[in-house]
Image (cartoon, rainbow, N blue to C red):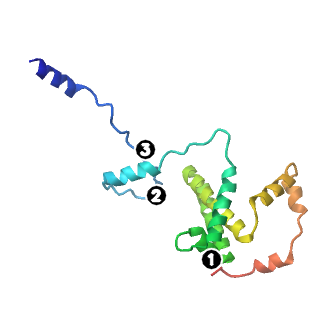
Amino acid sequence: MAKATKKKAAARAPKTDKVAKPAKLPVPKNIPVKKTRIRKAVLKAEAAHLKPLVLPEDGDAAVLDRLWATIESRRMAGNAATSHSARLIARGTPKVAQKLGEEAVELVIEAVAGNRPAIISESADVLYHLMLLLVDAGITPGEVWAELRRREGISGIAEKASRPRPKALLAIAQTTKLP
């Protein structure tokens, strides 16, 4: 009789080693949601890679310097078969610039829509493609940081008014779409 009582008590006890269900991702209201069953293996793989964003308390802008160094190393290796960075650089500066423009437009669209998670994601894409453009142009992040330091404390209106308007830039602006 004692064995039967223990089994019933064990059956009623809540299990503590259950895995928490992953949070559902937000879906824009204008996109229909198709109810499908997602396989456990897919959910497990996603859970390993899609962890919540944890922001460092002090901020870590040095990640941009590390990103630039990674892209530079991929450019030097030049393996377009395994590196997206090397592949884009091999296609030439116009393609690198075009990709930066595309990512910037995607960021603007998400900003206007007010989609915070997408703004964060697209901002990362813009920063990556900006670093790619800098590597392609042979510019180090330190040069950009120095320019930002030079402008620090200067009104944006005054700084923009002091810039010369190069005629070459105006001529380039009249080109058609990039290949």
Give the percent coordinates (x, y) of residue 94: 68, 77
Give the percent coordinates (x, y) of residue 162: 91, 62
Q: Earlier in the sequence, mark 1 or mark 2?
A: 2
Q: Is residue 57 visible?
A: yes
Q: Quadrant of residue 173?
A: bottom right
Q: Which mark is residue 112?
A: none
Q: Earlier in the sequence, mark 3 or mark 1?
A: 3
- Please name the residue shown 12% across and 17% down the image: 2
Q: Residue furthest front?
A: 77
Residue mark closest to the camera, 3 vs 1: 1
Say which residue label 3 marks.
23
Q: Secondary structure at mark 1?
A: helix
Say which residue label 2 marks.
30
Circles 1 and 2, Cβ within 8 Å, touching? The answer is: no
Q: How far apart are the alpha carbons under marks 3 and 2?
A: 21 Å
**Amino acid type for the residue under numbered disc 1:** Ala
Circles 3 and 2, Cβ within 8 Å, touching? The answer is: no
Q: Secondary structure at mark 2?
A: loop
- Please name the residue shown 77% across and 79% down the image: 172
Q: Residue furthest top?
A: 2
Q: Which quarter shows the C terminus?
A: bottom right
**Amino acid type for the residue under numbered disc 2:** Asn
- 58 vs 65: above or below: above
Give the percent coordinates (x, y) of residue 22: 40, 44
Q: Earlier in the sequence, mark 3 or mark 2?
A: 3
Q: Secondary structure at mark 3?
A: loop
Q: Quadrant of residue 143?
A: bottom right
| Label 2 Cα crowd, 10 Å radius (few <14 / some 14-19 / many 20+) | few
Q: Is 20 on the left-hand or right-hand side of 15?
A: right
**Amino acid type for the residue under numbered disc 3:** Ala
- Please name the residue shown 72% across and 66% down the image: 134
